[in-house]
Image: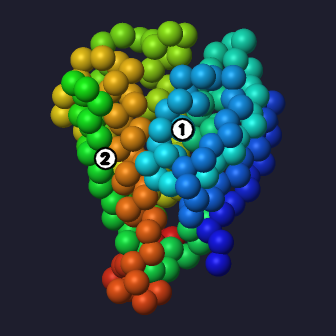
Amino acid sequence: MKRQAAIARKTRETAIQLKLSLDGSGATKLRTGLPFFEHMLDVCCRQALFDLEIRATGDTKVDDHHLVEDLGIALGDALAKALGDKAGLRRYGSGAAPLDEALVRASLDLSGRPYLAWGLAFRQKRVKDFDLELLEEFARAFCDRARLTLHLELAAGKNDHHVAEAGFKALGLALRQACEIDPRRKGAVASTKGTLNK
């Protein structure tokens, strides 16, 4: 069974078409008009081995906020749809990614309970023309819609680009682990409740 999903989301502020495959090779085709953010999504997918295609536009003449947040919503919806009933999944995932002086740890639970503990801190407001505050807004929307718990911890880092990239790589590693099928579970859901969707 293919674990994939397609999401179309259109509001007065944004228009998004997104395709996600969990059992891919890390290939991406991203057209959002946000080069730095596309770079973050790309490094995440390369570590998760997710294939991701996005065509998106938004009212970026006003601000990038609506588009980045709505991309978090769409990607979270796609992950939830692709995972289905979460039968046989490992459920938990963690990863630590260094990038030069930066080190970020990610811990993730496909719990059905949305929660984000954002521990990344940046020295500047922007990398080039991208507002770094929007990375937290994306992560929160993603966690809410995918219904997962995510902790991101900054262990070290001075360069904002390195911190952000290490964070998204660590997220990718945690997603890859949590979304893997554990053959020892023999199709059972990794929960005493018998479900991870309620």
Q: Quadrant of residue 169?
A: top left
Q: Residue at x 63, y 38 (%)?
A: 71
| Circle 2 SS class | strand
Circle 2 or circle 1, nearest the eye: 1
Task: Tell me, yes or no, whether the two marked residues, 2 and 1, touch with CB atoms within 8 Å.
Answer: no
Q: Residue at x 30, y 55 (%)?
A: 94
Q: Is residue 144 left or right of residue 120?
A: right
Q: Inspect this view and state whether residue 97 appears.
A: yes
Residue nearest the observer in this picture, 36 or 92: 36
Image position, residue 198 (x, y; %):
49, 71
Instruction: Rate crowding at label 1 as few (under 14), some (14 to 19) or many (20 or more) other CA atoms within 10 Å.
Output: many
The residue under label 1 is 42
Which sits earlier in the primary sequence, circle 2 or circle 1? 1
| Circle 1 SS class | helix
Query: In the image, which disc is placed on residue 106?
Result: 2
Residue type, label 1: Asp
Image position, residue 66 (x, y; %):
65, 27
Instruction: Rate crowding at label 2 as few (under 14), some (14 to 19) or many (20 or more) other CA atoms within 10 Å.
Output: many
Q: Is residue 120 left or right of residue 113?
A: left
Looking at the image, residue 87 lies above or below residue 56: below
Looking at the image, residue 181 lies above or below residue 165: below
Q: Is residue 195 left or right of residue 21?
A: left
Q: Is residue 6 left or right of residue 95?
A: right
Residue furthest out toward the left: 155
Residue type, label 2: Ala
Q: Residue at x 46, y 13 (%)?
A: 127
Task: Measure the alpha-carbon separation of dots 2 and 1.
Answer: 17 Å
Image position, residue 123 (x, y; %):
30, 13
Query: In the image, which disc is placed on residue 139?
Result: none
Image position, residue 158 (x, y; %):
24, 17
